[in-house]
Image (cartoon, helix red, strand yellow):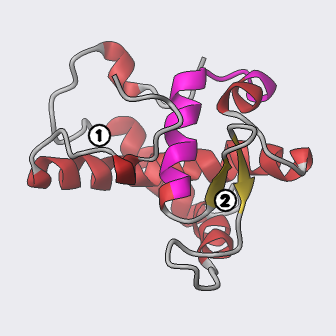
Amino acid sequence: TIPMSTPRSTVEPILPHKVGLLLDGWEAVPLLAAFVRQLLPLLREHQGPCTAQELATSASLREGPVALVLRTCAVLGLLRLDDSTGGYLLTSRGPNGEPSSLLAELEVVLGTKSDAAEALLALYAEAPPPFGLTSSEGALYLFA
């Protein structure tokens, strides 16, 4: 079992490389859209380290999927894990320490005011993923 606070980059790949890329590619848009639309405003309001449990409670979402989104965003350099609290903080640096404009770009492309994001998310809502899901819950991301 992988602990919820373990960033994906520290975990040995479980799936074959090509299958992992397919999963990552398929899940990236709704995962990042959920972060920008639901979790980012809460992180900004909190103004300090915020755990997956705190965010899930604030947004009435399930903790496990919220933790997955937070870990993914930490790997991308959008967040950093505060080891002393187990909470996540927004960062202005990319994964290699360079200044990051990724967050601002994600807000423009995937935010609630983006027609392109609405169209793209509508495709995700209607199209089956390109792999089999083991349960009906596999289709849900952050919803309670």
The mark that comes first in sequence, 1 or 2, is: 2
Q: Residue furthest bottom?
A: 98
Q: Looking at the figure, which quarter contains the N terminus?
A: top left
Q: Residue furthest front?
A: 84
Pointer 1: residues within 10 angstroms few (<14), some, or many (20+)?
Answer: few
Where residue 77 sits: x, y (%)?
56, 65
Query: Left or right: where does residue 16 sit relative to residue 84?
Result: left
* Camera-nearest residue between 68 and 104: 68
Where residue 91 sits: x, y (%)?
70, 66
User: Considering the numbered disc 2 on the image, is that residue within a helix, a strand or a loop?
Assistant: loop
Query: Image quarter for residue 139?
Result: top left
- Asked whether residue 62 is drawn in magenta, I would say yes
Where residue 56 sits: x, y (%)?
69, 26
Seen at 56% across and 75% down, the residue is: 94
* Camera-nearest residue between 6 and 58: 6
Seen at 56% across and 51% down, the residue is: 33
Query: Image quarter for residue 58?
Result: top right
Looking at the picture, which amino acid does disc 1 mark? Ala
Q: Give the range drawn in magenta.
A: 57-74
| Residue at image mark 2 | 111
- Asked whether residue 65 is drawn in magenta, I would say yes
Residues at marks 1 and 2, CA–CA distance in whole angstroms? 21 Å
Main SS, magenta region, reads: helix
Residue 96 in the image: above or below residue 53: below
Looking at the picture, which amino acid does disc 2 mark? Gly
Where residue 2 sits: x, y (%)?
37, 29
User: Considering the numbered disc 1 on the image, is that residue within a helix, a strand or a loop?
Assistant: loop
Give me the disc on residue 127: 1
